[in-house]
Amino acid sequence: MLELDRLVMDFGRFRAVNNCSFRVEEGSITGLIGPNGAGKTTLFNLIAGAFHPTSGRIRFLGEDVTGLASHQLFHKGLVRTFQIPHEFHKLTTLENLMMVPPSQPGESLFSNWFAWRRVSSAERDVERRAYETLEFLELTQVAHEPAGNLSGGQKKLLELGRTMMTDAKLVLLDEPAAGVNRTLLRKLETKIEILNRDRGYTFILIEHDMEMIEKLCAPVICMAEGRVLIEGDFETVRSNPQVLEAYLGETTGDAA
């Protein structure tokens, strides 16, 4: 589904991503781990179209998408979330979902005046779909609550729901466990599993929570200093001496 070929990203003299290559298979949940500063978020920004690589190629669904902007990739089904949720905090949870689908007829002034029946029908369809998404995420109780009032875990669920409203094919999840209590984290894990297993979503997951990585991800890719150290199953990656030194360090006991 996704292929990275010798990606390089330089910021002046600093090389944040260094000849990074790997493939993401359709239907997988790929874990991307590594210490802070390893280049994981920069790599996400390259994949999602926020940055243009210094060199190298990105292919998505067999198409060379190197250099395409985020909105162009969005329309192709490649969507990302952020470590800090980007909700519209004054809009309700329901409205945050309803505004996601692109090319809604209500966005056109002409349609609002001369095709209002079509606009009304489309809005009902989007609202129904948004309610179904909230029901799946178990957020119906906060449907009409301003999104800014949600807890950290609820905001992460809302971020996941927004990707569902796009019919995304590949979702980049940036530290979904950050700031989430354990109860909501288990719920978030379950929803990701269901979307992957039953609905065909493919995920790449940046995460420091090794329990989440172990539960969800195969394969696991470890980065350090902008390059890929190793790729394999969780046990292989966790026990690799380079990973223990570069990533786990003093937390080896906790991760084990």
Image (tube, rainbow, N blue to C red):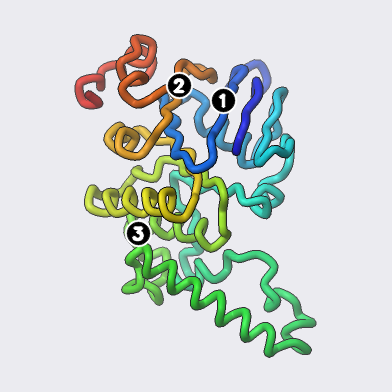
Residue shown at 25% from the left, 19% from the top: 252
Residue 231 vs residue 255: left or right? right
Q: Residues within 10 Å of mark 2 (few under 14, many from 20)?
A: some
Residue 116, picture quadrant: bottom right
Between discs 3 and 1, the one toward the N terminus: 1
In the depicted view, which residue is nearer to us: 192 or 111?
A: 192
Q: Is 156 situated above or below 116? A: above
The tag on residue 154 is: 3
Secondary structure beneath disc 3? helix
Q: Quadrant of the N terminus?
A: top right
Q: Viewer-nearest of labels 3 and 2? A: 2
Residue shown at 62% from the left, 18% from the top: 19
Where does the image place residue 84, in percent across and percent down from the top left? 44, 48
Q: Is 91 situated above or below 164? A: below
Residue 5 vs residue 25: left or right? right
Q: Residues within 10 Å of mark 1 (few under 14, many from 20)?
A: some
Secondary structure beneath disc 1? strand
Labels 1 & 2 near each other (Cβ < 8 A): yes
Residue 152, picture quadrant: bottom left
Where does the image place residue 172, in percent across and percent down from the top left? 51, 43
Q: In the rendered structure, which amino acid carries the disc numbered 1?
A: Phe
Tell me the distance, in whole angstroms, between the alpha carbons under discs 3 and 1.
32 Å
Q: Residues within 10 Å of mark 3 (few under 14, many from 20)?
A: many
Please name the residue that numbered disc 2 is placed on.
231
Labels 3 & 1 near each other (Cβ < 8 A): no
Q: In the rendered structure, which amino acid carries the disc numbered 2?
A: Glu
Where does the image place residue 132, in percent across and percent down from the top left? 43, 71
Q: Residue furthest top?
A: 241
